[in-house]
Amino acid sequence: MSVRYDDFKKLDLRVANILKIERIPGKTKIVKGEIDLGDETRDVIIGGAEFYEPEDLIGKTVIVVANLESKKMGGVESNAMLLAADINDKPFWLTVDSQVPPGTKIK
C-alpha cells in the first residue's frame, strides 16, 4: 500500500526528550511517560514496559508523532506516540543525537 505524499505531510514528526516515567498500577506492558517537546510537555503511554526498566528510558531523545489523536489506555491519556522498530515484539525506540533540541521537526 502506498501513502500519498500529501498524507505523509500531515504527520507532525518531532524530536522529544523523555523526562520521567511512572508505572501504571495493574499494568505490566505500558508505562506513563512525560516528554519535552521544546515548547510544551505531554503525557504519553509507552509500551514495552516488560522489556525495560523505567530509568532506562529517562533522558532518551526520541522521535514522536506529535499530532496523533489522543487515546486513553490504562486510565491515562496519551498525547503523542513514540516511534519504535519492532524486533520479535520488542520495541527499540527510534532515537536521535541528544544535540538535537526537543521540538525539532523531522522532515
Image (tube, rainbow, N blue to C red):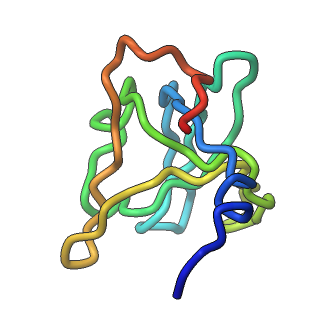
Residue displayed at 52% across by 88% down: 1
Residue 77 lies, with reference to residue 63, above or below; the image says below
66 displayed left or right of 13: right
Q: Position of residue 105 (x, y in %)?
A: 60, 30
Please identify the quadrant where the C terminus is shown: top right
Q: Position of residue 99 (x, y in %)?
A: 37, 11
20 displayed left or right of 81: left
State the residue lying farthest toward the right. Answer: 69
Residue displayed at 51% across by 50% down: 82
Residue 87 lies, with reference to residue 92, above or below; the image says below
Q: Position of residue 18 (x, y in %)?
A: 48, 30
61 displayed left or right of 21: left
Residue displayed at 45% across by 62% down: 47
Q: Please name whichever residue, 104 or 75, is drawn nearer the observer in this view of the structure.
A: 104
Q: Position of residue 29 (x, y in %)?
A: 42, 68
Residue displayed at 58% across by 35% down: 14
Q: How many marks?
A: 0
69 displayed left or right of 27: right
